Amino acid sequence: MRFDQKTVGIVLTVLVVFVVGGLMVERTVEFLNSDFSNNETDFRGFLIQIFAHILTIIGWLFIIIAAFLKGHFNDIEKPKTDILELEEKIRKKEIMDRKGG
């Protein structure tokens, strides 16, 4: 079975979101099972940390979706071939400069 690039990108994105989300849930359950009633600042710091993680996940999702909609995943081989062609042009120019100079 052959998967296209879009399917692989979507699957990897979903996996990353679920792994990070699972770690956040695990940390939340662990924190809530501990005795946090003695120190309120620990709980506030924990909420800020969870909020920061959520905003980070949302930010990365927006970046990935924007790149997908702009077509950056259509031809992922093109940058590689562009670099190789540029390297070939540079080498030819260097050879011409050595012969001419």
Image (spheres, helix red, strand yellow):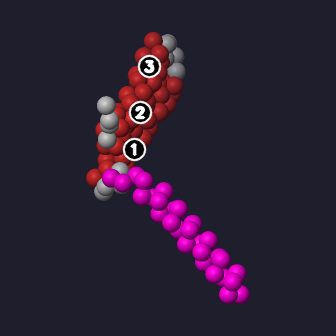
The span picked out in magenta is 74-101
Is 89 one of the magenta-colored residues? yes
Label disc, if present, on residue 1 of the rendered structure: none
Task: Please tell me which of labels 1 and 3 falls first in the chain.
Answer: 3
Q: Is residue 44 above or below residue 39?
A: below
Query: Residue at the spot x=35%, y=51% of the render?
Result: 73
Label disc, if present, on residue 16 of the rendered structure: 2
Q: Residue furthest left?
A: 69
**Observer-nearest residue: 6 or 87?**
87
Q: Amino acid at mark 2?
A: Val
Tell me if mark 2 has few (under 14), some (14-19) or many (20+) residues whose alpha carbon lies within 10 angstroms of its own. Answer: few
**Observer-nearest residue: 38 or 1?**
1
Query: Residue at the spot x=33%, y=53% of the render?
Result: 74
Q: Nearer the viewer, mark 2 or mark 1?
A: 2
Residue 72 horizontal/vertical position (percent): 36, 54
Q: Is residue 47 visible?
A: no
> Does dot 3 land on a helix, a strand or a loop?
helix
Residue 10 horizontal/vertical position (percent): 32, 38
Is 27 one of the magenta-colored residues? no
Of helix, strand and loop, which mostly describes the magenta segment? helix
Marks 3,2: beta carbons within 8 A: no
Tell me if mark 1 has few (under 14), some (14-19) or many (20+) residues whose alpha carbon lies within 10 angstroms of its own. Answer: few
Quadrant location, the C terminus: bottom right
Q: Quadrant of residue 12?
A: top left
CA gap, disc 3 and disc 2: 15 Å
Q: Amino acid at mark 1?
A: Trp
Marks 2,1: beta carbons within 8 A: yes
CA gap, disc 2 and disc 1: 10 Å
Q: Which residue is mark 1?
A: 60
Residue 54 horizontal/vertical position (percent): 39, 36
Label disc, if present, on residue 26 of the rendered structure: 3
Q: Is residue 85 above or below residue 65?
A: below
